[in-house]
Amino acid sequence: MKKRWQKVILVVLLFFWAGGTYYGYQQTTGSRDKLQKVTIGYQKGDPVDVSRSRGVLVKKMKELGYRVVFKEFADGASEMQALAAGSINYARTGDTPPVTAAASGTDIAYIAAGASRSSGSGIWVQKDSDIDSVKALQGKKVAYTQSTSSQFLLLQALSKAGMSASDIEWVNMKQADAAIAFSKGDVDAWVTWDPYTAQGQVTQQAKLLTNGDGLSQNRDFILSTQQYAKKHEAVSEYLVKYLSEDMTWANEHPKALTKLLTKALGMKQTIVAKMVDRRDWTLTPMTKAIAKEEQTIANVFYENDLIKQRINVSDDVIYVSE
């Protein structure tokens, strides 16, 4: 009889122990489910990746009731597709993807913009190439990536040199593939941005024909859709605020940032350090002046028949306060 009661007591204790654990788990999950999910698209080494790696933004957003989830993409065009499909709420891209996306009917909302990255963008040739100017690219193969800042920069450089788009052979490829093609000599020139620019300089001692100064600002943009942004004004304000704080940290701690990005990018520290040294990471809400810059890209793409309809960028801007 004593042993029988011992078994009963043991079963009861196990029941309450299991029940307590179960309900404890349910409470944890329930607490997590109460957090509003916010999904942000990013690319390796960009401002959002810095915030993701640092971890401060996630903690601050959680305190306000939001669970931030990050999704990595290979390029801005893929992010625009994800934004249009509703699989992400925000995207960090360069300056050209939102223009081409808006022209194709995607619901775009500009939320914030980064500082100019013109000094880290450029048109490069091999160190021993006899091509010594943009003008000398006549009839040459030039690698670029469609619907990115590299396409706009190349158009602007050709125009400045008194050339037309038909004066060169455009070779559209992903930047990772372009890096390989350039190293093998399969293309005569390569239009790119950091960290690829820094990679070409450090590993191949590539020769610069022109950077983006006066041609392309190549800013970062934080984007959403009009539908989402108008319903979640507070989320946009918090993101701009905390991303801006992370970028202030990035500007003030170049050594720590270099270490963080070296790991994130999987590149040599000397390459990452070159990129960090010439970059301003500042991020601010949209301004009318920056919207005007974007309009220039839209106009150039329309005039070159790269987009089929005119767009008014200012219609897509949402001005938020930090």
Image (tube, rainbow, N blue to C red):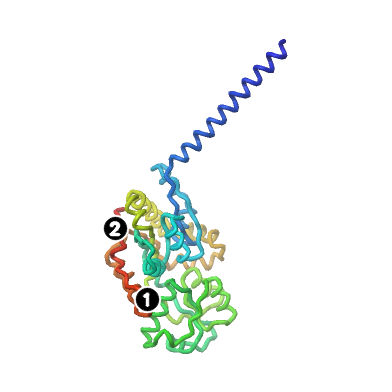
Q: Amino acid at mark 2?
A: Tyr
User: Residue 247, located in which quarter of the rendered image?
Assistant: bottom left
Taking depth in this image into account, of 42 and 131 the one nearest to the observer is 42
Disc 2 versus disc 1: nearer the observer: 1
In the picture, which quadrant includes the N terminus? top right
On the image, the x and y values in percent for residue 18 come to 60, 28
Residue at left offset 39%, top offset 86%:
164
Left or right? Give the position of 232 relative to 199. Answer: left
On the image, the x and y values in percent for residue 296 come to 32, 74
Give the SS element for disc 2: loop
For the residue carrying disc 2, how many other residues have a C-alpha within 10 Å: few (<14), some (14-19), or many (20+)? Answer: some
Residue at left offset 36%, top offset 65%:
115
Q: Amino acid at mark 1?
A: Phe
Mark 2 and mark 1 in contact? Answer it, CB < 8 Å: no
Mark count: 2
For the residue carrying disc 1, how many other residues have a C-alpha within 10 Å: few (<14), some (14-19), or many (20+)? Answer: many
Residue at left offset 28%, top offset 65%:
314
On the image, the x and y values in percent for residue 82 come to 46, 59
User: Residue 152, located in which quarter of the rendered image?
Assistant: bottom left
Q: Residue furthest left?
A: 288
Left or right? Give the position of 213 relative to 123. Answer: left
Residue 244, compared with residue 290, is above or below; it is above
Give the SS element for disc 1: helix
Measured in 3D between alpha carbons, the distance from the residue under mark 2 to the one under mark 1, in whole angstroms, is 25 Å
Residue 1 got which mark? none
Residue at left offset 38%, top offset 58%:
224
Residue 16, compared with residue 96, is above or below; it is above
Residue 301 got which mark? 1
Label 2 sits on residue: 319
Residue 80, compared with residue 177, is above or below; it is above
